[in-house]
Image (cartoon, rainbow, N blue to C red):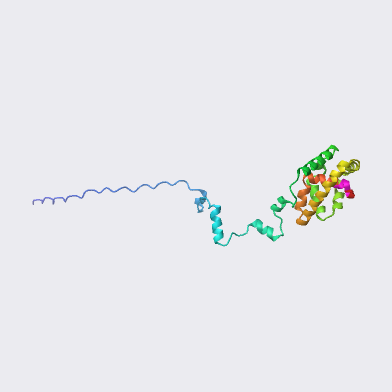
Amino acid sequence: AEVAPPPPAEDEAPLELRPSTPWPVREGRRSPAQEAGLRPRLRLTPTATDEEFSSLFEAAGGPPPAASDAAEEGGDGLTWKDLLAAIDEPPPRPMDERREAQLLSDIVALGIDPSALLPRGRIDEIGAVVQTGDMEGARQVVRRLAPAATRRLTRRLFTDDTLKAEAGDYLRRYRGMLDEAVARDQEGFMVATLLASDAGRVFLLLDAAAGDMM
């Protein structure tokens, strides 16, 4: 039998080229924060200007009181503003500064080192006594710490009228500052600040040497 020829092949459809699936891009190594599922760090943007904040506060009825203002209004705590302002004394005049420097120089010339005789730890102890208003008790502490120095100063005050006059003015002014500090600061920080300076040590030594004579 005669084999029938195969039917003619249909025209094959042209191949359609499609873009291949891109290879996954390898990500960079994740940070520990990303591995832990933490949110990425926020990028900080410049804040609004002070004028813009002011307008917002004015529209809302005004800004809330600052923490320092609240502390001052409370009256119970002492702020650093109070410590820095210290007491309501006028700025030191040139005459006061010269007197203080001269008195310190006179004391050092007698072989007395105020900082060595009255270190900060002892100043705190004396300040606690001054805070109670017991000036005589404070003098006794100074005399116990520096007996030879206070005796030397006492003799000098009795023999040097110029030094005695300068010391008298200085002691009166510094006592007034201490009295006001005691009245304003119940915790004693102001008193400790006043006494821990060179001027405070000069006062303590002269006051212990002079006693009630000035």
Q: Quadrant of residue 198?
A: top right
User: How far across and how far down the image is residue 1, in percent?
Assistant: 8, 52
Taking the spot 54% from the left edge, 61% from the top edge, the residue there is 59
Is 137 on the left or on the right of 83, as rendered? Answer: right
What's drawn in magenta, residue-wise?
A: 207-211
User: How far across and how far down the image is residue 40, in percent?
Assistant: 50, 51
Asked if residue 3 is positioned above or below residue 74 in the image, the reply reads above
User: How far across and how far down the image is residue 209, in percent?
Assistant: 88, 45
Taking the spot 54% from the left edge, 58% from the top edge, the residue there is 56
- Most extreme residue toward the left is 1
Q: In which quarter of the image is residue 158?
A: top right
Taking the spot 84% from the left edge, 37% from the top edge, the residue there is 109
Is 209 on the left or on the right of 121, as rendered? Answer: right
- Most extreme residue toward the bottom is 61
Q: Kindly tell me whether residue 185 is visible in this rendering.
A: no
Is 12 on the left or on the right of 211, as rendered? Answer: left
Q: Kindly tell me whether residue 138 is visible in this rendering.
A: yes
**As rendered, which of 60 and 41 lies closer to the eye?**
60
**As rendered, which of 124 and 95 lies closer to the eye?**
95
Q: In which quarter of the image is residue 202?
A: top right
Count of numbered marks: 0
Asked if residue 192 is positioned above or below residue 65 in the image, the reply reads above
Taking the spot 82% from the left edge, 53% from the top edge, the residue there is 130
Magenta span dominant secondary structure: helix
User: How far across and how far down the image is residue 163, in percent?
Assistant: 86, 42
- Residue 67 among magenta residues: no
**As rendered, which of 92 and 200 lies closer to the eye?**
92
Asked if residue 116 is positioned above or below residue 78 in the image, the reply reads above
